[in-house]
Each structure stands twice: as C-alpha cells, then as structure tokens.
Image (spheres, rainbow, N blue to C red):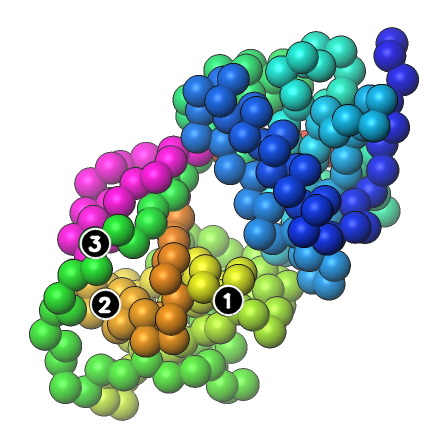
Amino acid sequence: MQKYKITKMNDFSSHQIAQIRMLEQQCKEFDESSLRMGLESLKENGGDQAFLCQSDNQFVGFLSWYTSDGIEANMNGMVHPDYRRQGVFGCLMESAAAEMQIQGIQTCRFRVPSNSRPGIDCIRHLGGDFSTAEFSMNLARPQTPTLRRPGLILRLEEADDFDFMVTCSSQAFGDSEAWTRNYFTHTREPERVTYIAVDGLTTVGMIRVNHVDTDIAVIHDFCVLPAYQGKGYGREILDYVVSLLLSKQCTRIRLGVVTQNRRALSLYQSAGFEISAESHYYVTTLNKM
C-alpha cells in the first residue's frame, strides 16, 4: 500500500483552509455532487477535529468530526478522485478512531451528499446503515414577516430556562430527556445563541443560532412545544429570528431540516428559504470501523 502522511490539523490559517477548500471543489466537480465539508467549523478553539492525508506534499484526503453529546461523532470526509480505493480513507479513519475511542465515542454518523454515488458506495462498504435525510436550506428571498401576535417575544436564554429547553426539545423531536440534557450541555459555546419564545406569560418554544462567521448564521434546534404546534407560532418565531439576524448584518442565513417528508419544508420555503443540498446520514458503531 502506498504510504501516506496523516496529520491532525493544527494549522487553521487562511492558506491551509484554502488548500482544503480546493480539494473540496475538486471532489465536488468530479462527482457532480453538492459536497460541503462545513469548513467554516474548522477553528483552533472549539472547532471540529480534523485529520489530513498528504501524498508527495499534496492534500489527497480529509476527515473531520465533532460530537454534540460525547457519544456520537458526526463525520465528514473526502478523498481526491485520483487517490480513491487506495487506502486513503482507511488511514484517515484509523487515526480518527484512535482519538474518538479515547474520548468515549461509540457511534459514527456520516453525512454524504445524496447525489454522491462514490460517497454512498464507500459508506455502505464500511457497513453504514441509512438513518435520515437532511435538507440544507439558504435564505434566498427574505419575505415580509407575518403579522406577529402582540405578546410574542424572543428573549435570550437564562440559566432557569435549561429545564424548559430539555422538555421542549425532547417532546418536539422525540429524543429522551437524558440525551437532550447531555446534548445541550455539550453545545454551550459562546457563538451559539439560544432564544426562548414567550407569548405573554407562556413559554412556547425555542430557537438557536450558531454564528459560524461574522456574516454567516445557522439556525438549528428550532421547536415549539407540542401543545402549541399548529397555531402559527412556528412561522412567527422563524420570521422573528430572521429579522433579528438581518438587522445584525448576517447576510448568509442557513438551516438544516431532518425529515423524510418534503412537505415539512413548506414552513421554511414560505419564509424565503430554498433547498441548497440534500444529504443522507449513515450510522455505524465505532467498533465496526
């Protein structure tokens, strides 16, 4: 097997990121896919973990991962078209797995563009099972906000809101309260802001924003308590946070929707979001890798 140089990424300079972005573009064009590695999440403090593969001083492979709950790792990876089926991904995964085992990771969750046949074939070969689909959406056409009920406000999260966040999210998404509590504990970075939706004296929902760059904001963990769903709160809260972000000069607003039902996207489309990519998630246990 050809020898490769595998290194953990510790250089986060613009030059290094540009080289990785070039590899991303090469893979994207060759596969004619909507590949996106989420390179904006690569940063020295609090960013994704990443490993690089070099051959003759050329970047030929990349693998990054992060965990939001300390148990499952969310994975992104790519290999230069000229170096596929030559052990590059296996070498990267071996290095990453050694580190993940130390940190207690049990499960790997790979994100693969739905239109990347090489990516899907690779993950299936590794024993990954299809889990869910995610639609990445960008705000393309800001809409005139819907008429908001007078008592509805979004306020910043306070210490006393943690139990509500756990209850609201677990009831809305169907996750256990234990998992949700662990997830929120692991995702309290300074750049991640949580807004609590309150109508009068009633707390009805929540929405979070990850400010990944000065002009890029990613909306996530958006939910309304089941008792208040179907009453128009979702669209009003979404409009509210979009208006807030636009007023803060966030020119690129994104979100991801995990669903098997495209009709669930209608809320976001009505607010001016358009689908930019569809990704499939494949899950396998670390001990199978």
Q: Is residue 288 magenta?
A: no
For the residues labelled 3 and 1, the Cα–Cα distance comes to 20 Å
Q: Classify mark 3: residues with Cα within 10 Å, few (<14), some (14-19) or many (20+).
A: few
Q: Position of residue 128 (x, y in %)?
A: 59, 24
Please tell me the numbered disc located at residue 141.
3
213 sits to left or right of 269: right
- Closest to the observer, 217 or 180: 217
Q: Position of residue 114 (x, y in %)?
A: 42, 25
Q: Which residue is mark 2?
A: 239
The reply to whether residue 229 is in sight is no
| Mark in the foreground, 1 or 2 | 1
**Residue type for callout 1:** Thr
At a point 20% along the width and 49% down the height, the residue shown is: 269
SS class, disc 2: helix
Q: Classify mark 1: residues with Cα within 10 Å, few (<14), some (14-19) or many (20+).
A: few
**Residue type for callout 3:** Arg
**Residue type for callout 2:** Asp
Q: Which residue is mark 1?
A: 214
Please tell me the numbered disc located at residue 157.
none
- Closest to the observer, 123 or 180: 123
Write the start and end of the magenta stretch as one range: 257-279
| Mark in the foreground, 3 or 2 | 3
